[in-house]
Amino acid sequence: MFFILLKRKLLGVKNVLSGITFWKAAKNSIFLFAGLLLLLSLYFTFYKLLKYLDGVELIGTMLIWKLTSIVFLMSFSMIVISSIIISMTTLYYSFDLKFLFSTPLNSRTLFMDKAADTVLYSSWTLVLALMPYIAALIYVKKLGPAFFFSYLLLLAPFIMMAAAFGLIFSLLVMYLFPSSRTRDITWLMGSLSIALVYVAFRFSKPEKLIRPDTLEIVAQYINYLQSPTVEYLPSWWLTKAMMAFSGGHYVVFLQYAGWLFLACLALYSFLYFLSGRLYPAGFSGAQNTPKFSGGRTQSFENRLLPAYPGLRGFLLVFLKERRNFSRDVRYWSQIILIIALIFVYLFSIKNLPLDTAEMKSFVSFLNIGIVGFVLSAICLRFIFPSLSLEGNTFWLLKSSPLSMESVFNSKLVFYSAPLTAMGFLLISFSNYLLSADLFISSVSIFTIIVMSFVMSAMGMGFGGAFPDFKVENIHQIESSYGGFVFMASAMGYVALTIGIFAWPVQMHFMSRFNSAYPFEWRWFYFCVAVFLALSFFAALVPWKIGLKNMEKYEI
């Protein structure tokens, strides 16, 4: 029975490949090229790091393997958390589950089929991200291709065991609390766990790993390097197996490899047994819908309608967006991750080793680019998909008396206001932590406020130019061709902004270092005018294109 489901997947892949047009092939080639460039940049980064560690006398090899064990441990933890979140969808909310449960297929067979999907979806990005690290490790330590193939051999049970913990958790939780609300709670808890892991890793100051002088005594540092990194987890078994293989201790390698495979077999045997008892009951409970618990309190948008009848369309769409945002737990889980990112970002800013006031102000100027990148990523996550997420209900908006311009305006106001506030707070706190001077602080705050609104308009425009109302997962929208074009355009806009203000900032620092060098305010105002003109067209052009495309869109 399992092979029937596997054949179904293979036929699906075949149909997708046979339906690729020239345009789709060109788009996929662009994505593939961008992905290869990213992996190549990761490889050179890891190579420089490992080369530096390997050059440390006496303890270079220990440093490398300690770092490797930490990398494997973090990867294992991230796959566990990712599998918890993904398994909730694959096991209980996939679009084909109702059809599959109506067939004579055994529930255990269905579970193992969806478990395979969970393993793939929760690990493929981390597996790809680990490849440059392993390649750099092989090159630095001159380990050869046999090491790489042995790593691939042990990688399969490693990721399967990590995903198994998430599958067991989902089975037990949905069996004990069979409700669609359970998925929402799990998503929130999973996002919170990822945020805590990320924050804890950064706050632990991993830079101490390459600075033994920060520890009290060298012996303590050596003991730290030699100690196991959570020895009872598969991540340490994988590390020990790779260490043994690199040192030619093949008996030890086979011992740890055997532990990995046997533990993986035991875990999935337990899962197979458990799924027959828990999976059908959990799936049945997951289809239940909680009772409506709302009241009759009138929203503030409805209270404004009598006073502003001309804004009726705008206010109603704004009300819809606000309620969708508050009810969809996916938004709140992403907000948790964004908050964690902000804390780590501010912590990193605070700990920058900057000595002079001029250097701090200069970093504050460059910080405009970093904050701009953060804002563009948030736009990609929340604003760009906002039209596509209307999904099958878009026909209601299209057939209603509301103009598409009202829909665009409502969404823009709803999303741009919090984005602008977040950009303002982020750049203001950064300037405060860096003790930036008044000129740099004023320029950066003004620039970020304008950029926040412009990128919100760009997100709406590109979202309307590249809509997709048939996607099941929001990440498919973000990683689409339209998402790539939006991010490329947004980053180009950020880069041009930095370039425009580089001249006034240079004049500012020159006038501070040399009183005979005057600051030309007329050229500063000229640069501000150029920036405002660039921002106007960067917002207007995609906005008009997206609006026109949505007005002509046929349901």
Image (cartoon, rainbow, N blue to C red):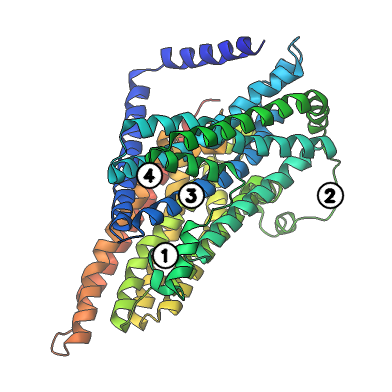
Which residue is denoted by mark 1 in the rendering?
207
CA distance for labels 3 and 1? 15 Å
The image position of residue 39, as x and y in percent, is 34, 41
494 or 401: nearer the eye?
A: 494
Identity of the residue drawn at 55% across and 61% down: 199
Picture quarter with the C terminus: top right
CA distance for labels 2 and 1? 50 Å
Marks 2,4: beta carbons within 8 A: no
Q: Quadrant of residue 523?
A: bottom left
Which residue is denoted by mark 3 in the rendering?
69
The image position of residue 487, as x and y in percent, is 39, 46
- SS of the residue under disc 2: loop
- Depth check, mark 3 against mark 4: the one in front is 3
Identify the mark nearer the N-term, 3 or 2.
3
Identify the mark nearer the N-term, 3 or 1.
3
Identity of the residue drawn at 56% across and 38% down: 474
CA distance for labels 3 and 4? 12 Å
**In this picture, is 515 found above or below 510?**
below
Which residue is denoted by mark 4 in the rendering?
133
- Depth check, mark 3 against mark 1: the one in front is 3
CA distance for labels 3 and 2? 50 Å
Identify the mark nearer the N-term, 3 or 4.
3
Q: Amino acid at mark 4?
A: Tyr
- Depth check, mark 2 against mark 4: the one in front is 4
Which residue is denoted by mark 2 in the rendering?
294
532 left or right, relative to 281: left
472 left or right, relative to 523: right
Mark 4 closeness class: few <14, some 14–19, many ≥20 residues within 10 Å:
many
CA distance for labels 2 and 4? 51 Å
